[in-house]
Image (cartoon, rainbow, N blue to C red):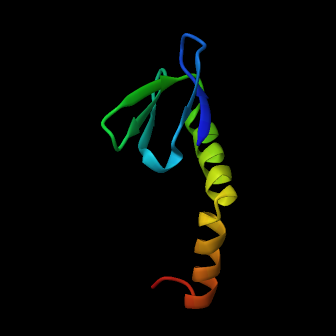
C-alpha cells in the first residue's frame, strides 16, 4: 500500500500491486487494474519510488533480484 494525495488534498492509500500504469501530463493519473483512475499530486517518479519501496518491504523486489542472480541475465 502506498500513500498518495488527490488534487483536493485528500490523502488516500492505494494497493501498489493494482497499478497498471501511471501517466504524467498536466497532472499525474494512476490507472488501476480495477478500472479505477486517480488523479494525484505526486509525480510519476515519486509513484515509482513509493511502489519500489513497498515491493521491497513485502519482499517482492529482493526475491526478484535473488532470482536474477541465480538464473543470470536474460537473453
Residue 58, percent from left and from top: 64, 59
Tell me how many marks there are. 0
Whether residue 17 sits left or right of residue 33 in the image: it is: right
Quarter of the image with the C terminus is bottom left
Residue 32, percent from left and from top: 39, 40
Q: Is residue 57 above or below residue 68?
A: above
Q: Quadrant location of residue 10? A: top right
Furthest residue toward top: 8
Which residue appears at 65% of the width and 46% of the height?
A: 49
Which residue appears at 69% of the width and 56% of the height?
A: 57
Residue 9, percent from left and from top: 60, 13
Q: Is residue 11 above or below residue 75?
A: above
Residue 48, percent from left and from top: 59, 46
Quarter of the image with the N terminus is top right
Q: Is residue 43 above or below residue 26?
A: below
Whether residue 53 sits left or right of residue 64 in the image: it is: right
Which residue appears at 59% of the width and 65% of the height?
A: 60
Q: Nearer the viewer, residue 31 or 45?
A: 31
Q: Nearer the viewer, residue 3 or 72?
A: 3
Which residue appears at 38% of the width and 29% of the height?
A: 37
Furthest residue toward left: 35
Amino acid at each position: 500500500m502506498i500513500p498518495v494525495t488527490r488534487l483536493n488534498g485528500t490523502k488516500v492509500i492505494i494497493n501498489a500491486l493494482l497499478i497498471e500504469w501511471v501517466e504524467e501530463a498536466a497532472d499525474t493519473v494512476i490507472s488501476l487494474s480495477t478500472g479505477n483512475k486517480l488523479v494525484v499530486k505526486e509525480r510519476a517518479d515519486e509513484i515509482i519510488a513509493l511502489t519500489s519501496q513497498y515491493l521491497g518491504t513485502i519482499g517482492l523486489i529482493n526475491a526478484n533480484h535473488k532470482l536474477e542472480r541465480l538464473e543470470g541475465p536474460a537473453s
